[in-house]
Amino acid sequence: MTSTGSRVNLEVSTCGETVACPGCGVFSRRIHSRYQRRLSDTAITSREVLIRLRVRRLFCDNAECGRRTFAEQPSGLAGRYARRTTVLQRVLCAVALALGGRPGARMTRHLAATVSRMTLLRQIRALPDPGEVTPRVLGVDDFALRRGHHYGTILIDIETRRPVDVLTDRTAETLAGWLRAHPGVEIVCRDRAGAYAEGVTVGAPDALQVADRWHVWHNLGEAVERVVARHRTCLGAATDIDSDAAPAVVDLPQPPQSSAVSEPSPARTDKWAVRTRERYAAVHTLLGDGVSLRAIGVRLGLARGTVRRFARATSAEELLVNNGTGRRRGLLDEFKPHLHRRWNEGCTNATQLFGEISELGYRGSKKVMLNYLHPFRSTGRISRPAPKPPSVRRVVSWMMSNPARLDPADRQRLDAILATSTELTALAGHVRAFAEMMVDRQGRELERWMAAVDTDNLPALHSFVRGLRRDFDAVTAGLTLPWNSGPVEGHVNRIKMIKRQMFGRAKPDLLRKRILLSD
């Protein structure tokens, strides 16, 4: 063994034992010649290791064998024609699967076994696929190969939580073909996508389909949001609670007292609202002329689902789910009450105010605060802003939350809103009943719940119920059995991480290897 700089050289030779011919199996020890192999090995004390291995070439004494000579292969050290030891090869494969090309190449520098990114990618592609396994409980979901353009399908063994296969698209025909080629699947967990439902029905007609509970709950939340949006004028009742709870401030002008019935919020005038109203008018005009939904979509350049949504709406305002109160909070919003109070107390020194809010946790720039306070230097005082009603989505989150875990103040606001509308009260009751049915796994109560919804004037919830009836068996199974698509969603998130590691440039074959073979 010799050491030169950052490299350790090992001089190794094979011993004089007899070796079996790989062609006929006859042992021989008659030497023809010797040659030297160079093998890279794992590092020793952070230094690269190079093995110089002298190997014998021997005669095959079997006259019936097609080989005249053969080279001996050191058992367990390296494969035929390999330039790296088996141990180093396993390390590089693990690095490549975990990190990919460029990140993996950077890591190998610290392992004293530097290789290029293309070498690592070739290592991944050369790995064999895992053995084919037909799971008893199969999870199915799609993932984006290129978001908005191309999608694939990942298949997961729900019981072992390991990926089984990756399909190149998300069509029913591809999934049905895979299921026919792998008979034995008893349960399929999926989302509400119609293509997967059709593919399972065709490819594995005897399998029990289970609709994922999270997706059913998410669909219910979308229906609840549409109902609340139709009654957005009732949301102002929540501001009455805030006005009553707020302490009186003498030196600030008080907002006018709210009446028993909240004033309707002003109509939206942004470009999205204007476009929605124009499309709503155009769709209903064509419907009045007897034009079909498909023909309307062709004329207006809209998808058929969009035309159907406009046709089912009773007014354009029903389609404007976002009432403009749900904007993203700025860095300064949390500290504005403190600025208002200190400004009205007479402290107008910007440096002092900036220091105070910085101590309270403000992480923005001083320029943002100066721009906000600049208009108040001409007025001298900051008037208390009129209370704003909660956003539609915030009210929906209150309805979709467990009442026992809801903040008492939010609970009071929600009760005030529900008191102004019998439809919203009925909606909250249906949501609570569905949540109890889902948590307690009482899928047998689904038909009774849908019948109760049909008796109320809640069109958006009726649309949700129609979707449940089209997928009744799978939804009932999802609300009854313990299986769900949680493991599949976890692997979809892992696929996103793998794609980011490879800068979104991994071809499907390389991505498939990393999905199936990574730990």
Image (cartoon, helix red, strand yellow):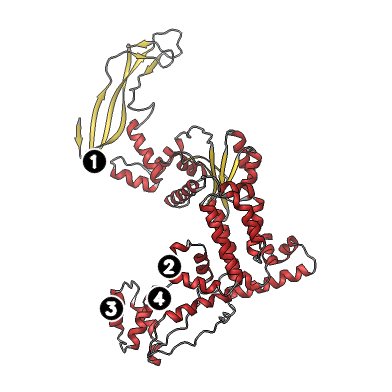
Q: Measure the C-alpha gap from mark 1 to mark 2.
A: 57 Å
Q: Is residue 476 left or right of residue 79?
A: right
- Numbered circle sitting on residue 113: none
**What is the C-alpha distance between the residues marked 4 and 3?**
16 Å
**Residue with the mark numbered 4:** 333
Q: Which mark is residue 407?
A: 2
Report the mark closest to the observer, 1 or 3: 3
Q: CA distance from mark 4 to mark 2?
A: 21 Å
Residue at (67%, 72%) from the top-left corner? 315
Residue at the spot 72% in from the left edge and 69% down from the top edge: 283
Query: Which callout, 1 or 3, points at the residue further toward the start of the chain?
Result: 1
Q: Residues within 10 Å of mark 2 (few under 14, many from 20)?
A: few
At label 3, which amino acid type do we have?
Gly
Helix, strand, or loop for circle 2? loop
**Amino acid, disc 1:** Ser
* Amino acid beneath label 4: Asp
In the picture of the structure, the residue carrying the numbered disc 3 is: 355
Q: Nearer the viewer, mark 2 or mark 3?
A: 2
Lower position in the chain sequence, tag 1 or tag 2: 1
Residue 163 in sight in this render: yes
Q: Which residue is mark 1?
A: 46
Asked whether 138 or 26 is in front, the reply is 138
Residue at 63% over, 75% down: 274
Q: Position of residue 496 (x, y in %)?
A: 46, 51
Q: Is residue 278 above or below residue 257?
A: above
Taking depth in this image into account, of 165 and 266 the one nearest to the observer is: 266
Crowding at mark 4 (Cα within 10 Å: few <14, some 14-19, many 20+): few
